[in-house]
Image (cartoon, rainbow, N blue to C red):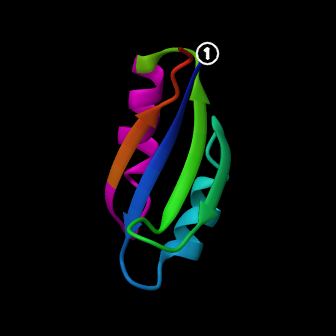
Amino acid sequence: MVQAYILIQTEVGKASTVAEVISKISGVMQAEDVTGPYDVIVRAQAETVDELGRMVVARIQAVEGITRTLTCPVVHL
């Protein structure tokens, strides 16, 4: 199982809507609108890195109002 934090920048005033839509995507564990340089932080999981990448590109980045994403995989050292 691969987990990651996905940091999202949105159009002005869209953070709450984006977080709500993303929270319903399969594999998303949590989606919160926040303050700071990013507007939404998502915790997601998938079986493989490739599956995680497909989730981000095909499903998350397709949400209206998103301008940029940064995916940070969780590592266990």
- For the N terminus, the quadrant is top right
Name the secondary structure under disc 1: loop
Please tell me which residue lies in front, 28 or 59.
28
On screen, residue 20 versus residue 36, left or right, reads: right
Residue drawn at (45%, 44%) of the image: 59
Q: Position of residue 3 (x, y in %)?
A: 57, 28
Magenta-highlighted residues: 50-68
The quadrant in which residue 46 appears is: top right
Q: Position of residue 13 (x, y in %)?
A: 46, 85
Residue drawn at (40%, 30%) of the image: 54
Q: Is residue 58 magenta?
A: yes
On screen, residue 72 versus residue 23, left or right, reads: left
Type of the residue with mark 1: Met
Looking at the image, which residue sits at the far left? 67
Please give the residue where the numbered disc 1 appears in the rendered image.
1
The quadrant in which residue 53 appears is: top left
